[in-house]
Image (cartoon, rainbow, N blue to C red):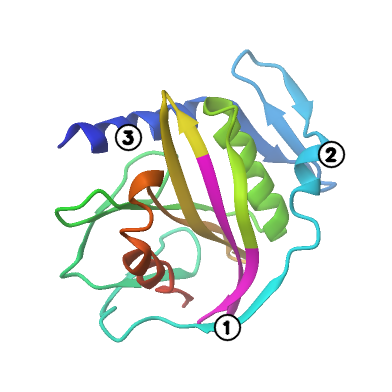
Amino acid sequence: MNKYVFFLLVIFSTLSNANQTAVSDTGDIVILKSDGTWSYQSNENIKEFAEIPLNKKEFNKGKKASFNLKSQVTNSQFSFNPKLWSFEKEIGDSHEYSFTLKGEDLYGMVITEGMELPIETLASAAMINFRSVAPAAKVIHKEYRVVNGNKVLYMETLAPISGVEFVYKGYYFSNESGSTQYLVYTSNGLAGKYKNETSEFLNGFSVQ
């Protein structure tokens, strides 16, 4: 395992053990802090997701996305090119699967939970968790997309951590089976290099 991958795994381990978010029966986001206290989410976080545009382009999986990986938590499915990507099933509650573009510094992950949430609430909760370890994390782009017939929220997040800028691109989706975050990440300096691989990977998202 190279140092870059190890550093990313440490980050996500920290994310999973930092402040957690939960949703009340009234739909409010509650921040559960590591010291045992809690607070409601600030309205400022919700404002980030107001007036999100819809991208009218069609987004469909590529012809070479021949391997179909099914979530064990939701009815989400992930299709990708097995010649380019390797994957591992994760043990624990932070994420369900992790992915690596073979021989490269591009990584992916699937985070699933059994609760259905408004997509904006799901993305807002994700940003709270980002900022628990990267206080300067910010959304740099967001839009709705229809991917293989399913409406998702696409979001790009820039997160400076320990002097390194990481960029996360992903689809956020929720239905009666639960909620899914399907993410790709790398350093901001390499994001342009992996533009095509990122798009092809994310567009493998579908519902069984």
Find the distance from the CA under tag 3 to the CA under tag 1: 34 Å
Q: Depth check: 177 or 48 in front? A: 48
Secondary element at image label 2: helix
Quadrant in the picture for the N terminus: top left
Q: Which residues fall within the magenta stretch? A: 143-158
Q: Is residue 12 above or below residue 78?
A: above
Point out the residue furthest to the top here.
35
Name the residue rendered at 47%, 49% in the picture: 168
Name the residue rendered at 32%, 35% in the picture: 9
Most prominent secondary structure in the magenta stretch?
A: strand
Secondary element at image label 1: strand
Q: Is residue 148 magenta?
A: yes
Closer mark to the observer between disc 3 and disc 1: 1
Q: Which residue is mark 2?
A: 43
Q: Is residue 126 visible?
A: no
Name the residue rendered at 77%, 34% in the picture: 41
Residue 90 in the image, given as x and y percentages of width and height: 31, 46
Q: Depth check: 7 or 116 in front? A: 7
Near mark 1 (Cα within 10 A), the count class, few <14, some 14-19 or many ≥20, is: few
Q: Which residue is mark 1?
A: 57
Which quadrant holds residue 194?
A: bottom left
Amino acid at circle 2: Asn
Q: Which residue is mark 3?
A: 9
Q: Depth check: 151 or 76 in front? A: 151
Secondary element at image label 3: helix
Near mark 2 (Cα within 10 A), the count class, few <14, some 14-19 or many ≥20, is: few
Find the distance from the CA under tag 1 to the CA under tag 2: 31 Å
